[in-house]
Image (cartoon, rainbow, N blue to C red):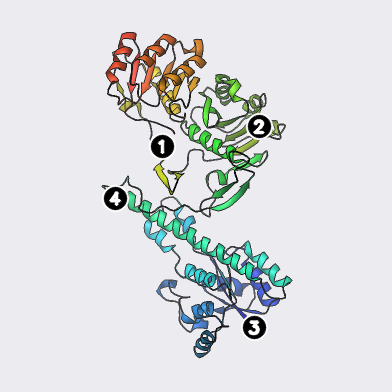
Amino acid sequence: MSRLALLSVSDKTGLVDLAKALVEKFDFEIVSSGGTAKAIAEAGLPVTKVSDYTGSPEILGGRVKTLHPRIHGGILGRPALPSDAADMAANHIRAFDLVVVNLYPFEQTIAKPDVTLPEAIEQIDIGGPTLIRAAAKNHAFVTVLCHPEQYPLYLEQMQEQGGEVAPGFRQDCARQAFWHTATYDQAIATYLSAADAEAATDDATELPQRWTLTGTQRQQLRYGENPHQPATWYQTGNIPSGWAAAELVQGKPLSYNNLVDLEAARRIIAEFPPHVPAAAVLKHTNPCGAAQGPSLAEAYQRAFNADSVSAFGGIVALNRPLDGETATAMTQTFLECIVAPGCDDEARDILAKKGNLRVLLLADLLSGPTHAPRAIAGGFLVQATDNIEDDPSTWVIVTDTKPDADTLEELLFAWRLVKHVKSNAILVTNNRTTLGVGAGQMNRVGAAKIALDQAGAQAQGAVLASDGFFPFGDSVRTAAAAGIRAIVQPGGSKRDADSIKAANELGLVMAITGIRHFLH
């Protein structure tokens, strides 16, 4: 008697070639449902519809078709076990040797703009995961395939082993099957949790009681932060997004540190929509220079000049497509990576001369993760990412001296950037260009000293941003002595009055945002 295969797939990639090989090379009978059966029949191959095989019609608009004892008995049955064999014979159940199933496109559906909750729910597969899990559980007797890329490997096994597959292959397929259904269920649970949070009125800011994170290996990395640390890049979901969707135009494969730095660069440049050209140069996730300018080339040059020493070997992010003039400027120094939303042909030709330079195109630099997990011993933490939109109209100007429109814009520029500097953080800017960055210091006085020393004489007439409040007036006096004209800080210290008094005595502008931007 010929062997039996169940084929029921949403993604029909490679389906006909697989079915043809099963029928013509390995003497399989195929049982199939819905569109899968139609595709196989249209290819001129014999196929039995599930409804004909079970003697039960599809009901509830196709919601119930494979949930039947002849199907699941054939998948879960153990022919080598006498009691199972007797039950199968008594109920006219044939064993399935192969189950090929993939699931309704839930992730693709929810990725569409304006998708409704009922539309999403209709794409929750019930029969598919049940078939996959049943076949994976019984992998001692059944092979389960849930990805089209597995088809050639299966056929190769069958060819090499005289129409059989190795137990290890079936076990590996079962493992992949359980990951497939786990990822699918996670996508559904995450979507419904987000929908619940959006609909909630009181606790919309609370995170769900359960949080799961799964991914598929996209790239085995050479190592992590250091050569002795193994590392892998995982893609969440089945649809490539973010860096997984970026185009690597040229250069070597990305490293762990490249990806960490690129994400930090993306977060910074996302602060600056493309109506004004902007560039950021980063090193070890901290900006060593960032600027806006009348052209992209000018913005890059200002950002580079802000700290040309640190920029060597840095990561550059741009908020506009790369052009020839900007590309030419970038070839004047050694850079690790460049990311931009696009790149014209002239720029591609210029950058191609720097073969080791990694150039990435990420069309949507503005979109990033909404939550950030971090591992700790025995568990992990999850927080919402610091994506709040800073609005100067909500700030309080606490000094007698008030800012003009340009000063307020400069303060906003500095405030947008200081949130991306490791705390304690102080940033000095002027003319929409960073002049000094004090990052990751154990005290705010030290961070201010580093930023002001780096700015030097250029601090005259500049502004200063602090990611945390000033608990004492000493840093304000130090800033004023260096020539700073305006300060933006979150406020909230019991001794805010001391800092405000110092600012008033020295004729400075001080803006209190009421928002803190610590970055640990």
User: Neighbour class for label 4 at 10 Å: few (<14), some, many (≥20)?
Assistant: few
Q: What number is the disc on residue 200? A: 4
Of labels 4 and 2, earlier in sequence is 4
Residue that carries the numbered disc 3 in the rendered image: 2
User: Neighbour class for label 2 at 10 Å: few (<14), some, many (≥20)?
Assistant: some
Local SS, label 2: helix
Q: Gap in Å between the C-alphas at discs 3 and 4?
A: 56 Å
Residue that carries the numbered disc 1 in the rendered image: 387
Of labels 3 and 4, earlier in sequence is 3
Name the residue furthest left.
202
Residue at coordinates 42% horizontally, 72% vertically from top-left? 61
Residue that carries the numbered disc 2 in the rendered image: 347
Q: Gap in Å between the C-alphas at discs 1 and 3?
A: 60 Å
Amino acid bearing label 4: Ala
Amino acid bearing label 3: Ser
Amino acid bearing label 1: Asn
Give the number of the mark in front: 2 or 1.
1
Amino acid bearing label 2: Ala
Q: Gap in Å between the C-alphas at discs 2 and 1?
A: 32 Å
